[in-house]
Image: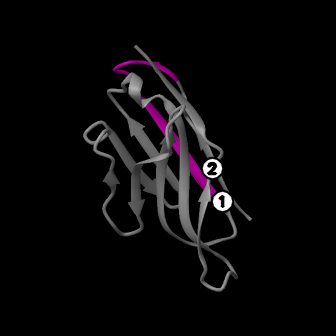
Amino acid sequence: QVQLVESGGGLVQAGGSLRLSCAASGSIFSINAMGWYRQAPGKQRELVARIPSGGSPNYADSVKDRFTISRDKNTVYLQMNSLKPEDTAVYYCAARLIKKNSGWSVDDYWGQGTQVTVSS
């Protein structure tokens, strides 16, 4: 089994900052990439930021220069600065990885989501 556990969401005023964390654990052989997605009410889930192993991160245009993704082994972080009300959403952590003894199968795993609310 693989688990992704997120933390760090909450309520913040516009212009404020939050830091999300996501720890992957379980029967993991290797992680290809980790990232953050978000889903606002009535909207589709969208990519916020993604960081591949050994590669450069990429960001949604709407968060460039405000959000920073980083990773330390099996934990990924999202530093969110200058938050806007339109950043309000449930934020999901995702990992593309190979489980141990899986025959090199690459699969995607998701966290349970953490609510971020930005008040104006």
The amino acid on which the numbered mark 1 sits, given as a three-letter code, is Ser
Query: Farthest bottom residue?
Result: 103
Per the image, the residue denoted by label 1 is: 25
Give whichever of 53, 85 is nearer the camera: 85
Question: Residue 14 magenta-drawn?
Answer: yes
Instruction: Mark 1: give few (<14), some (14-19) or many (20+) Cα within 10 Å.
Output: few
The quarter in which the N terminus is drawn is: bottom right
Q: Residue 119 sits in which quadrant? A: top left
Kindly report which numbered mark, 2 or 1, lies closer to the viewer in this rendering: 2
Q: Residue at x 47, y 28 (%)?
A: 88
- Quarter of the image with the C terminus in it: top left
**According to the image, label 2 marks what residue?**
111
Q: Is residue 53 left or right of residue 29?
A: left
* 57 to 13, vertically: above or below: below
> Where residue 52 appears, x then y in whole percent?
40, 65
Vertically, is 16 above or below 28? above
Q: Which residues are magenta?
A: 11-25
Side of 65 where 101 appears, left or right: right
Report the number of discs: 2
Hey, what amino acid is under mark 2? Answer: Gly
SS for tag 2? loop
Tell me the number on the disc at residue 96: none
Residue 12 in magenta stretch: yes
In the rendered image, residue 92, in percent from the top left (x then y), is placed at 55, 45
What coloring was used for the rendering?
one colour
Relative height, residue 10 to residue 19 (above, below): above
Report the residue at 36% width, 24% height from top.
84
Disc 2 from disc 1: Cα separation:
11 Å
